[in-house]
Amino acid sequence: MNRRERLENIIAILKKEYGESKVMLNYNTPFELLIAVILSAQCTDKRVNMVTKEMYKIVNTPEGFANMEVEEIEKLIKSTGFYRNKAKNIKQCSIDIIEKYDGKVPMNMDDLINLAGVGRKTANVVMGDITKEPEGIVVDTHVKRLSNRIGFVKTNNPIIIERELMKWVPKKYWFDYPNLLIRHGRAICKARKAECNKCGINEYCKKNI
């Protein structure tokens, strides 16, 4: 069985296990998702969802954040960590969206990464969940760990991992691949100890082929 066939089987099994691919951040609009992803840097999705649940009752638009003082935003997001830098980026990002994109979040890589606080990973998360057509493969700690454990890559460098995966993972799976691996990494293939006896894709792992 070649690598592509293993991937097809893994995706099918994980979809059956976890359902359709989606981010674990709660949102109602593309802008809310963008802000949530910015907040998720070095922070758990659970914490971000707790913060945004209350924050979005107060402010949830580019205009709202643009008109707030940075210190006000800091108070709302403090528990997500690195809140000073995140607050500054959220305010400037909101201003950029208003001034450059008529208040709407752009849905292409070049425009997204020109927004304050938005890098390639953030852009792909947003495009992936909104349009299902990211321009790359998101590589977080779970994707890095599982891609190596399964045997799809042999490096811990996220940039190289994305580049290598994009060479052979069909584009139709660029959104599914990271999102399903993230959920599996949290539930079964954990960092400290993989629960291989509970793993539905165990037979496709490199140690078993």
Image (spheres, helix red, strand yellow):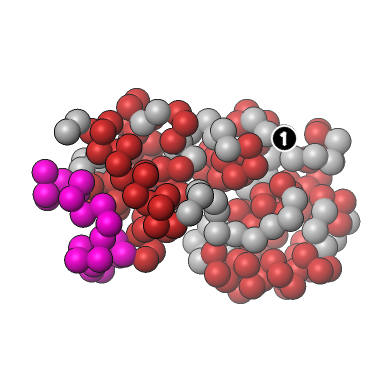
Measured from the top left, where is residue 90 in percent x and y?
71, 53
Image side of residue 134 versus residue 148, left or right: right
Q: Quadrant of the N terminus?
A: top left
Query: How many numbered discs, if any?
Result: 1
Could you tell me which residue is drawn at 55 percent across and 69 percent down? Answer: 46
Could you tell me which residue is drawn at 54 percent across and 35 percent down? Answer: 134
Query: Which contiguous range is marked in magenta?
Result: 188-209
Measured from the top left, where is residue 152 in percent x and y?
25, 39
Secondary structure, mark 1, is loop
From the viewer's side, name the closer residue of 191 and 28.
28
From the viewer's side, name the closer residue of 208 and 135.
208
Measured from the top left, where is residue 3 in percent x and y?
23, 33
Image side of residue 56 versus residue 165, left or right: right
Residue 84 placement: quadrant: bottom right
Three-letter code, disc 1: Pro
Measured from the top left, where is residue 99 in percent x and y?
85, 37
Residue 167 placement: quadrant: top left
From the viewer's side, name the closer residue of 85 and 17.
17
Could you tell me which residue is drawn at 50 percent across and 49 percent down? Answer: 21
Residue 76 forms part of the magenta stretch: no
Q: Is residue 119 visible?
A: no
Q: Is residue 124 visible?
A: yes
Q: Quadrant of the C terminus?
A: top left
Image side of residue 142 versus residue 116, left or right: left
Q: Which residue is mark 1?
A: 106
Residue 201 forms part of the magenta stretch: yes
Q: Residues within 10 Å of mark 1 (few under 14, many from 20)?
A: many
In the depicted structure, whether residue 198 falls above or below residue 180: below
Could you tell me which residue is drawn at 80 percent across and 58 percent down? Answer: 60
Image side of residue 180 versus residue 90, left or right: left
